[in-house]
Amino acid sequence: MAQKLAGKKVAVLATDGFEQSELTEPVKALRNAGAVAEIVSPKAGEIQGMRHDENGDRIRVDKPLAEADAGDYDALVLPGGVANPDKLRLEREAIAFIRRFVEDDKPIAAICHGPWTLIDAGGIEGRRMTSWPSLKADLKNAGAQWVDEEVVVDNGLVTSRKPDDLPAFCAKMIEAFGEGRHPNGAAGFTGAERENRAQ
């Protein structure tokens, strides 16, 4: 697996409040597979990680969101943590960044609370996926087929429930990112959803 993602560039979008292992473990797996993994954030400098309810480490941001172009990346990782995606959902630039990956049919891996932002970015409807259990109603209301499984892969979208799922999540993430674009990923979007995404 050492060079399975050689030449690939992956954005890991996060801000303060991310669940530490859900960022550091995928980044390590990506780099071990030969990818360039960059932590992108609306905040410059460092962002605060969490270990469940306790403060974890501060992690250096590789690229401020204002300087990041989604077109430069082959895939996207969305870590969880409760506060992290909740804050990102309020950042128009963050949602626009995620939406580009959705519209360009690029693979996305989201774990735990990470899929929250995909609702705002129009990347949910018609997709089979999982998440932290408290997101079940939100995702189903947005049109997803929610299932309680360790890892779910749906046409380039990889989702998992919690840190315990990270080994399976990282393995499927590497597979999906190695496959590249999945042209039918956005096939289920409705006209209204496309209109909302264009705003």
Image: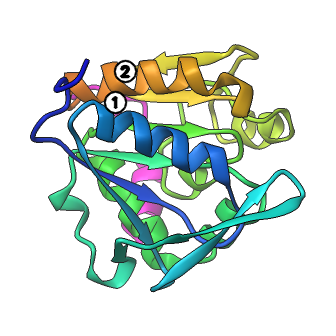
Q: Mark 2 packing: few (<14 Cα in 10 Å), some, or many (20+)?
A: some
Amino acid bearing label 1: Gly
Residue 63 visible in the shown view: yes
Residue at 42% x, 45% y: name it: 27
Q: Is residue 32 left or right of residue 91?
A: left
Residue at 61% x, 44% y: name it: 22
Which of the 4 image quarters holds residue 182?
Answer: top left
Question: Alpha-carbon distance for marks 2 and 1?
Answer: 6 Å
Q: Mark 1 packing: few (<14 Cα in 10 Å), some, or many (20+)?
A: many
Which of the 4 image quarters holds residue 50?
Answer: bottom right
Q: Is residue 24 magenta?
A: no
- The image position of residue 194, as x and y in percent, is 40, 52
Range drawn in magenta = 183-199
Q: Which mark is residue 185?
A: 1
Closer to the chain start, of discs 2 and 1, is 2
* Residue position for label 2: 155
Q: Extreme left residue here?
A: 7
Residue 190 visible in the shown view: no
> Which one is in front, 172 or 1?
1
> Which one is in front, 195 or 13?
13
